[in-house]
Amino acid sequence: MKVCVIAEGCYPYVVGGVSSWVNSLIQSFSNMEVILLTVVANREQRAKFAYELPENVTEVYEVYLEDKEWLGSKGAGKTVSLSRRESEALCSLILDEGDDYWPTLFKLFEKHFSVDKFLMGEEFLRAAQECYEKKYNQLTFSDFLWTLRSIYLPLFLTMKTKVPAADLYHCVATGYSGILGSMGKIKNGGMLMISEHGIYTREREEEIIKAKWVANIYKNLWIEQFRKMSRLAYMEADIVTSLYAHARELQLELGCPPEKTYVTPNGINAARLANIPGKTPEDEKFISIGAVLRVTPIKDVKTMIQAFDFAKKKQPRLKLWIMGPWDEDQEYAQECFDLVEMLGLSDVEFTGRVDIRDYLGRMDITILTSISEGQPLTILESYAAKKPVIATDVGNCKGLIYGEDDDFGEAGILTHIMNVKEIADAMVDLATNPALRRRMGESGYKRLMKKYTIEHMKKTYEQLYRQCAEGLMIPYPEEPFSLGSELEGVQPQEAEAPGEPEGALPQEAEAQAAPEEQPAQPEAAGQPASGPAADKTLLAAGLPEETPPMTERAQPQPEEKFERQRMMRHRSGSRDRRRWSGRRRR
């Protein structure tokens, strides 16, 4: 059974959260052959993996939302003439009239033409004018037109993707992932599963409302577009999962048919956090609060620091550990560093990317001050270490702290988002009451072991995967997936890329990925790091070598920018290397 896992903006490029969940899922189902289809911003993220890919991952494809078109003789500089049906489908998309236009549009973008030329051409202009007159004539037309172009450029580039064949398309969100999954199902057959951690439409809506780069009168156009994309995913999906009951309710509000929905809580490997080191003699001087997170605005680290400043004035023994990478938004991270310095706080440690097993046992309390979450794995990891949690009331944090179907009691303190006083008071309350900390930590551990372990999650998804196999009328694989003995002894060689013209020149590029258990250090953040791996051959796509200048005469077809390359691993003495070997388009 071949599963195409489709992820947007997470795995395998960043650690933690959804990425950890995806990695655990793939590892848990070693009996499945897995293809990764990843959606990233641009080519700067190309092959910069933060995880060592599991053994059952055989292909990797990348889709870039911000990209220059690579066009050869079939499509360079060409636009397209729309049939009446295609014109009606395009207008229906813009006007949000019905949902039956998607197959026509998917077929349209199989043609060879330039998306840039199309968006700047007469056909799109004519459609924009028609839609403007019907629904949007209260706006300034030139601004309306450019807004449409901004909205549809990433969507149309996504729709140009040649989605690989698979038995099951498993999307980790709706949005662009859902578009690709729907395309795969419609064009290649198979089934579609959507697993939402946060509710994609709501998250994008919150971002657009707060965004300064789009004028208020055009925000609804963006929000409507994300709703259309999610509605398609729900319509085409055979199974739609959410992490908790309220998230399922939101999916239903957004149009997901109830018979497709399942609640599938997160799960972690609790055994991995058993018998971890406790406090050091130096740690005993402090009451340590640990925050395991990426230093980004959505985690609201600034509010955490400000609350810690107030709390420390009341309890001088407090120490704050901020554990996680800061390279994702370096400007925001610098603002956090500056805030610590401005407040004169001496007991705040930014550790960078670490193995939490080396730190979690040293904490007395953990904290999460996010303004948006799903069902945070960091809370579950804290429970595995029997640590109480301070968390903002977002996502399923309330359910995790107070319990939804048990009587274990409170496992921490819940606060409102961005409420410095509440968060500071929670820090002080737990810092001054060791017995309360112990009781809450035990409650969290019991809650975790009841339904939030990796074993529970695997059992749930095995039932869903078996249901898909039955629906597809194919056998469910019982044995671990293997690439086969025919790959033994394979040496580095050129890989054949589909559609490659004669005379294409080979070129190699090395790529190394950091294993999950040993993440890269902060100074190397965002760069693949070396790690041990068994010899094998993987097929990869969408990871081309250095992009040739756009001034070169012949450039790759858009659907061929995800051309296949063969990634070889071989040993040189004691050193294990990965080697990307493929053909470069000239």
Image (spheres, rainbow, N blue to C red):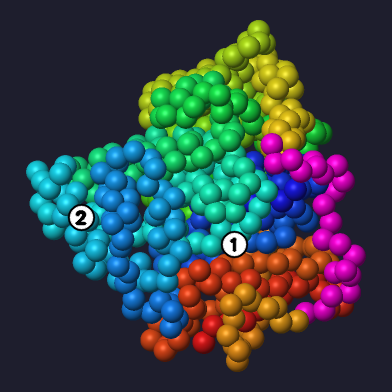
For marks 2 and 1, give the CA distance: 33 Å
Q: Amino acid at mark 2?
A: Ala
- Residue at coordinates 89% horizontally, 74% vertically from top-left? 489
At label 2, counting other C-alpha atoms closer than 10 Å, the crowd grade (few under 14, some 14-19, many 20 or more) is many
Residue at position x 70%, y 67% in the image: 539
The reply to whether discs 2 and 1 touch (Cβ–Cβ < 8 Å) is no
The foreground one among 535 and 137 is 137
Q: Is residue 442 above or below residue 135?
A: above
Q: Look at the magenta stretch and give its main secondary structure.
A: loop
Q: Residue 514 in the image: x percent, y percent?
A: 68, 59
* Residue 475 lies in the magenta-colored region: yes
Pick the residue in front: 142 or 362: 142
- With 280 as the anchor, is 93 left or right in this view? left
Where residue 61 is drawn, which disc sits there?
1
When asked about the image quadrant of residue 121, the answer is bottom left
Is 80 placed left or right of 292 in the picture?
left
- Residue numbers of the magenta segment: 471-492
Which residue is painted at 12% across and 48% down in the image? Answer: 133
The residue pinned by badge 2 equals 128
Residue 390 inside the magenta-drawn segment:
no
Q: Residues within 10 Å of mark 1 (few under 14, many from 20)?
A: many
Q: Position of residue 429 (x, y in %)?
A: 52, 17
- Secondary element at image label 1: strand
Front-lying residue, 254 or 579: 254
